Image (spheres, rainbow, N blue to C red):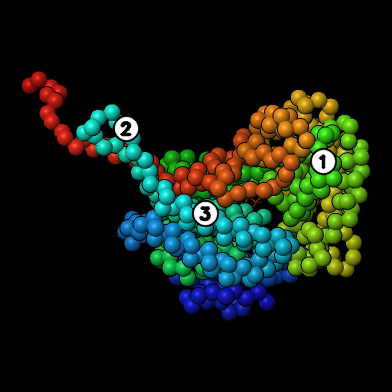
Amino acid sequence: MYALKAPSSHYRSGKGRMKDLHIDGIWTDAGTHSDVLNPATGEVVVTVAEAGKAEVDAAVRAARRAFDEGPWRRTTAGERAGLLRKTADLLVRDREELARTESLDTGKTLGEGRIDIDDVTNVFRYYADLADKDAGRLVDAGSATVVSRIVHEPVGVCALIAPWNYPLLQMSWKVAPALAAGNTVVLKPSEVTPLTTIKLVALLEEAGTPPGVVNLLLGDGRVGAAMVEHPAVDLVSFTGGYATGEKIMTAAAKGVRRVALELGGKNPNVVFDDAGYETALDYALMAAFVHSGQVCSAGARLIVQDGIHDRFVADLAARADRIRVGNGLDPETETGPLVSAQHRAKVEGYIESALEAGAKLEAGGKRPEGPEYESGFFLRPTVFSGCTRDMAIVREEVFGPVVTVERFTEEADAIALANDTEYGLAGAVWTSDASRAQRVAGALRHGTVWINDYHPYLPQAEWGGFGKSGIGRELGPSGLAEYQESKHIYQNIDPVPQHWFKG
Ligand code: NAD
């Protein structure tokens, strides 16, 4: 049975009664509950409370009060930095429990879970360090008797909504800068993977967050929609699918609330003939199949030059066939299950459509066989060659362990293929020619471009998408700016009459 270590105010005693919502500093239950499943076994891990409209209203009002009237507004940036640092220390203390919980909830391997928690810790530390260095700026107004300066202030009440693939990581990219900037927040993790966010809120409470500053709601899109529509919310930061992002932006237009959207991707991974062959192959597998491809920046579109294409596809397929799929908590497992039965069915629908469209199946395309796979949501790593731009599997985000391979001859063709997507989140180029690497990276219309690497990101470097991959940037200084208003304070220190009007 999943057990959450939590501070005193958090009550949890088995499946019957769950106080998982956190509103105005109090852990509370609600009228309805939902089951959280382990994707590797299909078993219920835990039952959690689900918010209704009343809880959404109470949480947003609590955040509003805490922002307008509470002590939070009077905290210094240094004090807020201290709180984030304390939270980072608590994340380190509970790393193993958090990593196991993330693996249990999402299906990812325990190793990936540990990497996630370390990354979350680094994000808290980064924004702790940035919080008190962000001092606005002085403006030269061209007069010795004027002091003009730009100060940064919090936006207010922020609704933070996260997806299921990197539950704690995606939430940390929002909550750490939002708190560093002095906002109050209402968090909603995905209904599919809420567990580590419950724990994070408990840690933030333990670190000393005042009541109402961090509120937690659980539930599905209806809860998210009610948060976005609430008139007391000033900003919505959302990570998830494009269709949901579009709805959120439409809803946030009422009252002209701020939105930050981190949406899907269909990311090209371009390999030139002169790339370091074995490394490019190794990373192509990792780019496509880590976390069973359920990664917004997954290298799902391989674009390979003529000279190495056939050999590359054959080697890729052979190695994909050898990937050990299994329960994420098994140390032998290299990639885990898909997050749910519904999601696997969606990915299988794409595989079907690719076959109908004439793509050639080189590896996978089916569920693994054996008793250990029967009740989980597993799917073999899948490779398709002979893919063309008109195929749905090439154009749409599949979000599963599926990589398509397209072929190119000239550099210009590779760029055209890589940019032929409505998305623009991330991409990579593999070549040993340094000037070509820079030329191609410069031409790609994607928010992150890796050269001879795949997937690394840094808390100090902006992350976000061009096109339908979203609006705004997380991480880096821009990730803090998302949660700040800029105010210009202009002081005339020697005002004298100017006789603006003659009378
Ligand atoms: P999703 O859009 O279905 O759900 C995301 C969150 O939004 C969930 O918490 C959900 O309950 C909530 N939600 C659903 N409908 C809502 C509504 N009408 N109003 C408000 N909230 C609502 O996405 P998902 O399936 O959880 O996540 C997968 C998607 O996330 C993929 O498209 C992936 O590319 C994207 N993603 C993007 C990034 C990035 O950095 N750009 C990172 C991770 C995931």
Q: Which residue is mark 3?
A: 126
Task: Tell me residue 501's x, y (percent).
Answer: 12, 22
Name the residue beneath numbered marker 2.
140
Which one is nearer the viewer's eye here, 448 or 422?
A: 448
Residue 215: x %, y % from top left: 47, 62
The quadrant of the image that shows the N terminus is: bottom right
Residue extending farthest to the top is 502
- Mark number, residue 61: none
The amino acid sitting under disc 1 is Gly
Q: Residue furthest bottom?
A: 13
Assign a secondary structure to mark 2. Answer: loop
Can I make out residue 178 in this image? Answer: no
Q: Amino acid at mark 3?
A: Tyr
Give the structural element (helix, strand or loop) at label 1: loop
**Label disc, if present, on residue 276 of the rendered structure:** 1
In the image, is residue 387 above or below residue 221?
A: above
Q: Is residue 112 left or right of residue 27?
A: right
Instruction: Report which quarter residue 433 is drawn in.
Output: top right
